[in-house]
Image: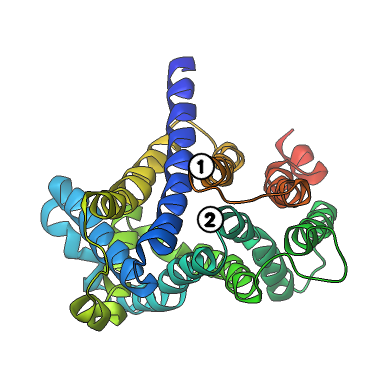
Amino acid sequence: MQRNRRLGLTEVISGGILWGASGTAAQAAFSRYQVPTLWLVGVRLSLAGLLLLIWYAAKHGRQVWSLWRDWRAAALLVIFSLLGMVPSQLTYFLAIYYGNAPTATVLQYLGPLFITGYLALAQRQWPRRVDMISIVIALFGTYLLVTNGQFTKLALAPLALFWGLLAGVSSATYTLLPRKLLASYDARLVVGWAMLIGSLPFSWTLATTRLPVVNLTVIGGIAFIVIGGTMLAYLLYLKSLESLSPSTTGMLSAFEPLTATVLAVTLLGTPITGAEILGGLCIIATTLLQALPTRDTAQSIG
């Protein structure tokens, strides 16, 4: 059991590092090699989706088509693809394009707070005390991240802030929309088809775009984003859930923004200040707070 837990910890940490590194690779692709954002989103969705479906079909064969035999599930899949998958991928990459990988990755961590707000409205009840504390800390962290601690000016480009906040909202819709599908179908099947469908709006861009620079570095970077930062990272995350609780994997996913920050600063020379670091830590801390058991939960378990 202890060995399985150690393996699970290694898997989730490795997955977070790969996700964070893929954000830095995307930043390099945009800033140094002028890779078009829409093109990279389309390539990532189409190739990663295809790889996930091949992975699933290798073990389950024709069951790869099972989801399409239920029209309700198919309709929900299309909705998830267009309103969950596409926005989450597009807004994240646009936040990187107009800002940088560390900021985009941290702002994406606001997703759980948007989920909290939605559930409070849907269930018509006030958020828990820990949720309210999380919201206050996240707002303070966002303020530091955006203004660098100065009231009079923005330290972050307005479009970077806009797409970063939308990345947080999209992270929430990406989490909420497929819940019924994931209760009935394998996650690889749901996400694989959602990615493949989500790539369709980018078909024209994929067919007509010519990259300004094509060399081994660009090709290797794109391959890493698709395979390492999407396919392999997703595999490691799924495997970690076999031996770790979702709350533990959620806390350890903080390695994603940590990796994006370290790599962007050391490899790309992205400037970062103490106020921005503190703001990022505040936002990430809200994820840790959400993973803590409440008093009510502890009593029900005991």
Q: Residue at x 41, y 69 (%)?
A: 85
Which of the two residues, 89 or 130, is positioned nearer the viewer here?
Answer: 89
Q: Residue at x 76, y 49 (%)?
A: 282
Which of the two residues, 281 or 31, is positioned nearer the viewer here?
Answer: 31
Image quadrant in which you'd find residue 127:
bottom right
Residue 264: percent from the left, percent from the top?
53, 47
Q: Residues within 10 Å of mark 2 (few under 14, many from 20)?
A: many
Q: Amino acid at mark 2?
A: Ala
Which of the two residues, 215 or 220, is positioned nearer the viewer here?
Answer: 215
Q: Amino acid at mark 1?
A: Leu
Q: Is residue 290 above or below residue 8?
A: below
Q: Residue at x 34, y 79 (%)?
A: 75
Q: Earlier in the sequence, mark 1 or mark 2?
A: 2
Does any portion of residue 18 appear in the rendered image?
Answer: yes
Horizontal side, residue 120 vs residue 236: left or right = right
Q: Residue furthest right?
A: 151
- The dot on residue 101 is 2
Instruction: Label 1: state its secondary structure.
Output: helix
What residue is shown with label 1?
263
Residue 160: percent from the left, percent from the top?
60, 70
Image quadrant in which you'd find residue 137:
bottom right
Which of the two residues, 122 or 9, is positioned nearer the viewer here?
Answer: 9
Q: Circles 1 and 2: CB distance less than 8 Å?
A: yes
In 3D space, how far apart are the residues under numbered discs 1 and 2 (Cα atoms)? 9 Å
* Quadrant the C terminus occupies: top right
Does any portion of residue 183 appear in the rendered image?
Answer: no
Residue 56: percent from the left, percent from the top?
21, 51
Q: Residues within 10 Å of mark 1 (few under 14, many from 20)?
A: many
Instruction: Label 2: state its secondary structure.
Output: helix
Horizontal side, residue 230 vs residue 288: left or right = left
Residue 100: percent from the left, percent from the top?
55, 59
